[in-house]
Image (cartoon, rainbow, N blue to C red):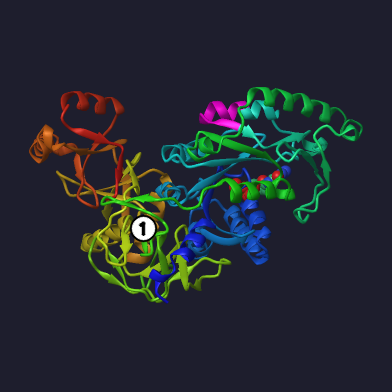
């Protein structure tokens, strides 16, 4: 079947794709909500495995657990399901225990995000951090306020907090009637009806009692004071909140808000419906050479995550590709643009139903997994032959640094090889100082160091000595042609040799102890540009 002959099929497949991530602070209910979303698509077994994974994660906060679960997480980090006439790709973003740069990069592969807020705790640090990344990319955000079956904050206060903390206009689509023991349900402000809450973990969604109208006379009698309060609040909200504006939502400046209780499977379906109705299908994507439309017949994709396989003997890796355009079919001939190498993936993994099953075809928005031995790197663009390089896969300036040496000097080569591969995977950033021979590791999360030391030992047979380094700030440095280009950059590097290091792709970086030092350096070197973020090139 030639891909060229089916543009209309590609078009309709693209239009029904929704690719999103759930972002939240740990314990807000992301796992529970994921499970309920999967239940809607009828994939009951999946729910079990999400729970199982979480259970073992909870058993110990030890990072070793992550290691054990890597096999599972390859499969559960992307979930595909069908809902109504849409194909939904749900990408997992790791919680704080295994937080790393990976999370940021996953967010570059989605078209929307669902933010889960614990109604008792409001906006928490991890949510704020993840949201910043979404905001930087103008990713549309839907908000789910969870745990209304508990004694929580007043909904108006919560709404205010979200607006203030996250800098978005909040438009409530539903409004809660009561909370905790007196949680009676939610008013659906758009459909003008009330969904009555009934507790129960295994309650089947969509079976709750629905009452028509927002001002039904029976409400006051049945729901008492809570109804009166909700009515007053809704009036306030109607006066204060602007109407929902699709454009504002799509550009990430307005978020529709829903209230519910994930564990009771309440309010979940409204979110899923909104996701299908409001969240955008895959859009065009910028490459260095041109802008690519998702309906174009030729396949293109970008690697946003690399995960090492469980079997240390094989050093297999799975590259996660976000399909950006065209039609992927198994066994087709592809090209890695960076290296010019050919790729003919016959064993491409899809994540449908969480079984790692062979995939036959995929369209823009889908995530496919290609097992490989290092042919694919983070940020790689794959095409049918066109020389195209997608931009936008971010590397963040590390915030923590360690020196790394081998206990046994004879293993120096293995250490370098191991770090090279782990660096390519994005597990850690590796820096080679301009002066001196001790390698430096950079990370955004402490856990990354532990994982790397563990993997060096178990996968590469190297016992590494990881010790603290005095740096706290890193910036990539460049110099525009107009400002002296390479020559000026070289002059800067020579002057600051003791503070310059080279990263995995040989980009020069300055490493500093204090933010104050950076300011001084910027003043002294006005022609040099300092970057906190490097995009794969
Ligand atoms: P995650 O860390 O964000 O994935 O959070 P989990 O889904 O594991 O939920 C954390 C805890 O909150 C678990 O004990 C859940 O059972 C509980 N939980 C989740 N949703 C609700 C809810 O709607 N109401 C209540 N009372 N508890 C909930």
Residue shown at the point (86%, 34%) measured from the top left = 216
Relative horizontal placement of residue 48, taking residue 66 as reference (left or right): right
Q: Is residue 352 visible?
A: yes
Q: Along the line of sight, which residue is nearer the eye, 503 or 325?
A: 325
Mark 1 CB lies closer than 8 A to ligand 1: no
The quarter of the displayed image where residue 406 is located: bottom left
Query: Taken as a whole, is the magenta stretch helix, strand or loop?
Result: helix
Which residues fall within the magenta stretch? 160-170
Q: Position of residue 281 (x, y in %)?
A: 50, 52
Q: Magenta stretch: residue 180 in it?
A: no
Please give the residue where the numbered disc 1 appears in the rendered image: 302
Establish if 370 lies above or below 196.
below
Q: Position of residue 432 (x, y in %)?
A: 21, 49
Whether residue 379 sits left or right of residue 81 in the image: it is left
Using residue 478 as the reference point, say whether residue 62 is left or right of it.
right
x and y percent of residue 177 in the render? 78, 34
Above or below 525: residue 195? below
For the residue pair 408 and 358, the one nearer the viewer reads as 358
Q: In which quadrant will I find the N terminus?
A: bottom left
476, 388: nearer the viewer = 388
On the image, which quarter does residue 194 sit in? top right
Q: Is residue 479 left or right of residue 157?
A: left
Of helix, strand and loop, which one carries label 1?
A: strand
Q: Is residue 91 visible?
A: no
Residue at the spot x=92%, y=32% of the render? Answer: 221
Disc 1: CA contacts within 10 A as few (<14), some (14-19) or many (>=20) = many
């Amino acid at each position: 079947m030639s891909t060229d002959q089916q543009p209309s099929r590609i078009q309709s497949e693209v239009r029904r794709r929704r690719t999103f991530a759930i972002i939240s602070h740990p314990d807000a209910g992301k796992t529970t909500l994921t499970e309920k979303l999967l239940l809607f698509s009828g994939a009951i077994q999946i729910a079990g495995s999400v729970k199982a994974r979480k259970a073992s994660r909870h058993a110990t906060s030890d990072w070793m657990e992550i290691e054990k679960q890597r096999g599972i997480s390859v499969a559960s980090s992307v979930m595909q399901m069908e809902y109504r006439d849409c194909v939904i790709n749900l990408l997992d973003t790791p919680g704080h225990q295994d937080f790393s740069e990976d999370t940021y990069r996953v967010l570059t592969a989605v078209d929307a995000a669902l933010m889960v807020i614990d109604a008792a705790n409001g906006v928490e640090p991890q949510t704020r951090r993840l949201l910043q990344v979404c905001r930087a990319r103008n990713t549309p955000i839907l908000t789910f306020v969870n745990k209304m079956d508990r004694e929580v904050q007043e909904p108006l206060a919560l709404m205010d907090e979200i607006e203030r903390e996250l800098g978005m206009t909040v438009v409530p689509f539903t409004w809660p009637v009561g909370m905790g023991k007196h949680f009676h349900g939610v008013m659906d402000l758009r459909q003008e009806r009330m969904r009555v809450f009934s507790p129960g973990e295994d309650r089947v969604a969509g079976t709750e009692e629905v009452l028509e109208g927002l001002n039904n006379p029976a409400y006051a009698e049945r729901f008492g004071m809570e109804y009166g309060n909700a009515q007053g609040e809704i009036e306030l909200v109607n006066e204060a909140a602007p109407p929902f504006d699709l454009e504002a939502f799509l550009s990430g400046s307005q978020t529709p808000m829903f209230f519910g209780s994930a564990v009771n499977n309440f309010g979940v379906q409204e979110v899923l419906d909104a996701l299908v109705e409001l969240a955008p299908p895959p859009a065009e994507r910028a490459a260095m050479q041109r802008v690519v439309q998702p309906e174009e017949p030729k396949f293109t994709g970008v690697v946003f995550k690399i995960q090492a396989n469980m079997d240390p003997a094989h050093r297999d890796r799975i590259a996660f590709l976000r399909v950006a355009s065209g039609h992927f079919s198994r066994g087709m001939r592809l090209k890695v643009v960076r290296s010019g190498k050919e790729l003919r993936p016959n064993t491409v993994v899809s994540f449908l139903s969480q079984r790692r099953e062979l995939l036959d075809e995929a369209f823009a928005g889908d995530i496919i997994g290609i097992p490989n031995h290092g042919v694919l790197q983070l940020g790689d663009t794959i095409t049918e032959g066109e020389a195209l390089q997608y931009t936008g896969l971010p590397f963040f300036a590390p915030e923590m640094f360690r020196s790394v040496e081998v206990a046994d000097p004879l293993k120096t080569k293995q250490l370098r090889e191991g770090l090279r591969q782990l660096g390519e995977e994005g597990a850690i950033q590796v820096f080679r100082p301009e002066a001196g021979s001790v390698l430096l590791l950079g990370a955004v999360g402490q856990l990354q160091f532990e994982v790397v030391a563990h993997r060096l030992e178990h996968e590469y047979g190297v016992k590494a000595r990881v010790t603290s380094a005095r740096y706290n700030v890193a910036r990539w440095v460049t110099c525009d042609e107009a400002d002296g280009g390479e020559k000026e950059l070289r002059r800067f590097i020579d002057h600051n040799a003791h503070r310059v290091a080279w990263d995995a792709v040989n980009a020069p970086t300055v490493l500093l102890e204090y933010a104050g030092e950076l300011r001084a350096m910027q003043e002294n070197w006005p022609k040099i540009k300092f970057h906190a973020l490097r995009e794969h090139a």
